């Protein structure tokens, strides 16, 4: 049963406490070395030929299959809810079937493998949490808060926009892009403007830090994706996006943050540093997805962010 309301916060707090104190499968007594895992992924990617996607896709799969049993990989993959064998099988299937290119967050096969492997950290963290099956599930879940209500109260320090769902809205947005090219990021916008309280806290904190670190005149942090349903994740897969399942987006713990647009302000490196600092501190997992960087809150980071929510948004 999915926890809701205050009980959801208690559930997250107890899970985060268990993670630190050593009473779960992902506990402090058995927490895999994430730094070693990320280093192993980086090393594996150097073996993937530049033309693997176009000329010899099977070569990349062979390299991955050969190295996946190494201790650094096995430590993470065996800690996922479905265990080592099923997780590897799903990984190889996704790498074989998911798309890459201009539409996908994965620019090429190497990027797809990197995204898939780094996402397993989040499967280990949150793969046992029930996902939002449909858009309606996410829209009506008490685990998620309505960003539109918070924005109207002036309680958000970051920016986003909703998807244009009508012909008039799409025409208006196209006209705005012609009048002010580069005025906003090129992104479809949020299908659902909802997320967990902890994600709101994280994004508000990041936006304030970004405002201090970025060059003068840089716009506030811009968010391109938050909670999604499994239903919508399948839509994205059908359209050719590298939309993984299970996904921390579908459990409400992930956000995608615009990165490429901030290059025009010379602010992207400051934003990257802020995200990587929080990854180093164990608060989030970060995945470079090109135009946007994906961030997922860890169980260890969730408890503190929940505690800070009232202070961040005023209750």
Image (cartoon, helix red, strand yellow):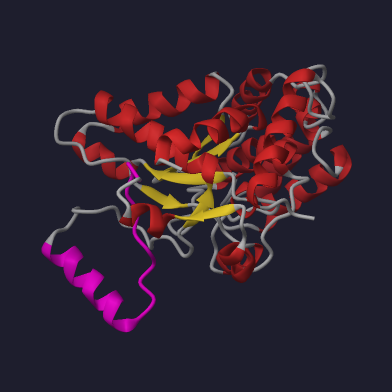
Residue 76 belongs to magenta span: no
Q: Is residue 157 left or right of residue 57?
A: left
In percent of width and height, residue 200 lies at 46, 43
Q: Position of residue 185 (x, y in %)?
A: 29, 52
Q: Is there any visible trace of residue 50 in the rendered image?
A: no
Q: In the image, is residue 111 above or below residue 205?
A: below
Q: Position of residue 229 (x, y in %)?
A: 61, 62
For image coordinates 84% across by 29% down, the residue present is 24
- Residue 176 rendering spot, x and y as whole percentages: 18, 66
Instruction: Give the residue drawn at x 66%, y 32%.
Output: 299
Taking 246 as reference, is 289 above or below it? above
* Closer-to-camera residue (267/296): 296
Viewer can see residue 40: yes
Q: Quadrant of the N terminus?
A: bottom right
Position of 135 with respect to 217 (left or right) is right
Judge from the rendering whether residue 152 lies leftward or rightward of residue 97; answer left or right.
left
Q: Quadrant of residue 306?
A: top right
Which of the pair 168/40 is nearer the observer?
Answer: 168
Which range is magenta?
A: 156-179
């Amino acid at each position: 049963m999915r926890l809701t309301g205050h009980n959801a916060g208690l559930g997250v707090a107890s899970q985060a406490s268990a993670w630190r104190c050593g009473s779960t499968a992902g506990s402090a007594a058995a927490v895999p070395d994430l730094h070693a895992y990320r280093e192993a992924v980086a090393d594996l990617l150097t073996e993937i030929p530049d033309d693997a996607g176009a000329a010899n896709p099977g070569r990349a799969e062979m390299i991955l299959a050969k190295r996946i049993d190494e201790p650094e990989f096995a430590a993470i993959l065996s800690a996922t809810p479905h265990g080592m064998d099923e997780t590897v099988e799903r990984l190889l299937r996704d790498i074989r079937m998911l798309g890459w290119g201009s539409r996908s967050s994965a620019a090429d096969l190497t990027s797809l493998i990197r995204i898939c492997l780094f996402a397993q950290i989040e499967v280990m963290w949150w793969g046992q949490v029930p996902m939002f099956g449909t858009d309606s599930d996410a829209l009506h879940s008490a685990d998620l808060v309505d960003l539109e209500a918070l924005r109207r109260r002036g309680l958000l320090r970051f920016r986003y926009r909703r998807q244009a769902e009508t012909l008039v809205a799409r025409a208006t947005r196209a006209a705005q892009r012609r009048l002010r090219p580069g005025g906003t990021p090129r992104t479809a916008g949020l299908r659902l403007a909802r997320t967990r309280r902890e994600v709101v806290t994280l994004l508000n904190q990041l936006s304030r830090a970004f405002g201090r670190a970025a060059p003068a005149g840089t716009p506030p942090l811009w968010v391109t994706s938050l909670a999604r349903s499994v239903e919508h994740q399948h839509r994205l897969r059908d359209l050719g996006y590298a939309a993984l399942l299970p996904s921390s987006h579908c459990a409400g713990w992930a956000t995608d943050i615009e990165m490429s647009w901030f290059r025009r302000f010379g602010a992207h490196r400051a934003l990257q540093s802020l995200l990587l600092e929080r990854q180093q501190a164990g608060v989030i997992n970060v995945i470079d997805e090109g135009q946007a960087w994906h961030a997922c809150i860890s169980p260890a980071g969730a408890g503190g962010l929940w505690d800070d929510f009232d202070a961040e948004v005023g209750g």
